[in-house]
Amino acid sequence: MKVIHKSIGKLIMVSTLILTISGSFANAETILLNFATTNPTNPALADAGWLSIWYSQVPNPTYFPVRFTSGDLEQTFTTVIGSQIFTLQGAAEGTVGSYINGDKAATSPVTGEGFYVSSAHSRPFSLSGFSEGDQISVYAISAWDGNSRAGMVTIGSETTQALAVDFISGLPTIDNFTLINNTPFTVSADGLLTGFFNWNTAAGSEGQIGGLILVVTPVPEPSTWLLLAGGVSLLAALRRRCR
């Protein structure tokens, strides 16, 4: 894989970036994903429950494992727990990458760095680890250049700009994120949340994404449905007896 380091600090990736993060999402209600340039440097992120998805030319598996795949080069770090995969697929040199604004990242670690899709490009992403039938609402936020270069995010048939709402500094809450899909995404049998990160069509610039918040409504397990059905039947029988 070819990684180009620019003087402004951008990392530009060729082909596909695949990152593996630990944990199980199946029963989660809210998933906080921070897009980072290198290993997490602000402990407040982990303390607040954020999972930092990051890439660097030299990954540090002490934090979150990362896998790069491009041509003949493959670096793989795996976790003991779980196998959830986040994939952001590039197409050619400069299509996707990441950047960190050191000064801003020190005070606003989620929006001070992030991933970007270059101008006039739209790239698919996916996240695994869900159950068929799960309903997912996706929220997104802008990154280091603020709303002026916020990327567009597509979930299903809806495309919405990832704007930061009434946010200045610190760790954003879901109220500071923009809801991308008014209609929840329904997970199919492959267990994937899929979508696209897009350039900023309004400004004609690259599209920057600082992070995502996923609100997941899990589909009940079959055993849960059986218990509910049994409980309803029992209540009906008791009601008939009381009469």
Image (tube, helix red, strand yellow):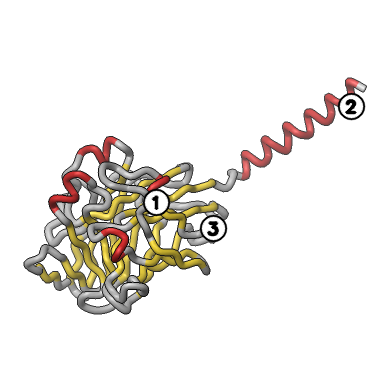
Which of the two discs, 2 and 3, sits closer to the camera?
A: 3
Q: Is residue 233 above or below residue 145?
A: above
SS for tag 2?
helix
Name the kind of residue labelled 2 in the image: Arg
Task: Give the residue type that dot 1 points to.
Answer: Phe
Residue 115 picture quarter: bottom left
Check the picture and name the quadrant holding the C terminus: top right
Judged left or right of residue 56, residue 122 is: right
Label whose residue precedes the other's in the sequence (3 or 1): 1
| CA separation in Å, label 3 and label 1 | 13 Å
Q: Decide: marks 2, 3 in contact (CB < 8 A)?
A: no
Task: Answer left or right for 211 relative to 1.
Answer: right
Q: Nearer the viewer, residue 201 or 180?
A: 201
- Tell me the crowding category of disc 2: few under 14, some 14 to 19, or many 20 or more residues within 10 angstroms, Cα based: few
| 234 or 196, nearer to the observer | 196
Q: Quadrant of residue 12?
A: bottom left
Pointer 1 with pointer 2, Cβ within 8 A? no
Of 25 and 141, nearer the camera is 141
What amino acid type is highlighted by mark number 3?
Asn
Q: Which comes sooner in the sequence, label 2 or label 3?
A: 3
Determine which of the numbered discs, if any, sits on residue 177 in the image: 1
Quarter of the image with the N terminus in it:
bottom left
Residue at which label 3 appears: 182
Residue at the image position 46 percent from the left and 67 percent from the top: 159
Please determine whether, in this image, residue 139 is positioned above or below residue 12.
above
- Please rate how many residues cluster around mark 1, counting C-alpha atoms within 10 Å: few if below 14, some from 14 to 19, many from 20: many
> Residue 30 appears at what percent x and percent y?
43, 44
